[in-house]
Image (tube, helix red, strand yellow):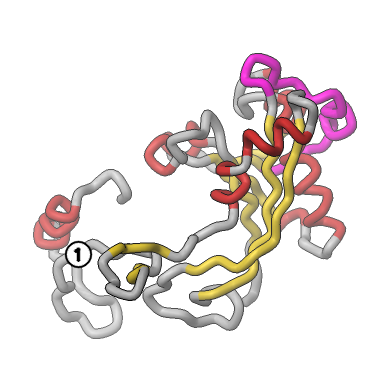
Amino acid sequence: MDNYTQQELADLFVQYNVKSPSTGNDLTPPISFNLMFQTSIGPGGNMQGYLRPETAQGIFLNFKRLLEFNQGKLPFAAAQIGNSFRNEISPRSGLIRVREFTMAEIEHFVDPNEKVHSKFSNVADLEIMLYSSKAQTSGQSAQIMRLGDAVEQGVINNSVLGYFIGRIYLYLIKVGVAKDKLRFRQHMDNEMAHYACDCWDAETKTSY
């Protein structure tokens, strides 16, 4: 649905006579909605500003200093914990959807021409449920794959990304997430960040 414009989505509602599942009424036309909180800056309020929706921006802005701190060498990583804000349409479900929350983030920087992780062999034999963008497009189900095979076959872009998928998987299992309720879903092209060549989300099915 992310591929449709506001008007195209409204036209589909009419074409397929889409109704509200709870009332049976017609749906109101789609509207644009900014998930970032807007604010006014300065005594005159003439400048617009936005509260950050995630913490990574600070790390990116300080990349040059961080690189210098690491003697100008790659790879290196930076971690940050801080408050983030998102203008959720309908906050609910306890801590799942709130407008202010604490976020922890790690950014690992590598040479784009050397995307190889020296410790990938430590996780290469893990068998993980992967839901690739290709499988999503073709209507196939997620499948269990060995991480090493996923990297070799190009399902996962490189071994650096594969290594961290493996480490995140092990962490989630350790804190109590059931293996059969956990999968990694690859972002589709239309939801990929402009700076990303590949991206995966850890998704877990819960009773909450």
Q: Quadrant of residue 165?
A: top right
Question: Image height check: is 72 above or below 1?
Answer: above
Q: Quadrant of residue 21?
A: bottom left
Question: Image height check: is 98 above or below 184?
Answer: below
The boundaries of the magenta stretch are 111-129
Q: Quadrant of residue 83?
A: bottom right
**Would residue 142 be seen by someone viewing this image from the given angle?**
no
Residue 128 position within the rendered picture, expressed as x and y whole percent measured from the top left: 73, 41
Image-based side of 168 in relation to 26, left or right: right
In the displayed image of the protein, which residue is found farthest to the right? 122
In the displayed image of the protein, which residue is found farthest to the top? 113
Other residues around mark 1 within 10 Å, as few (<14) / some (14–19) / many (≥20)? some
In the displayed image of the protein, which residue is found farthest to the front? 43
Residue at horizontal 39 percent and vertical 69 percent from the top: 37
Question: Image height check: is 15 above or below 207?
Answer: above
Main SS of the magenta part reads loop
Asked whether 7 or 183 is in front, the reply is 7
Residue 206 position within the rendered picture, expressed as x and y whole percent measured from the top left: 65, 69
Asked whether 124 or 26 is in front, the reply is 124
Residue at horizontal 69 percent and vertical 54 percent from the top: 182
Image-based side of 56 in relation to 172, left or right: left
Residue 198 position within the rendered picture, expressed as x and y whole percent measured from the top left: 55, 32
**Would residue 176 be seen by someone viewing this image from the given angle?**
yes
Residue at horizontal 52 percent and vertical 29 percent from the top: 197
Q: Amino acid at mark 1?
A: Pro
In magenta stretch: residue 191: no
Image-based side of 99 in relation to 25, left or right: right
Q: Which residue is mark 1?
A: 30
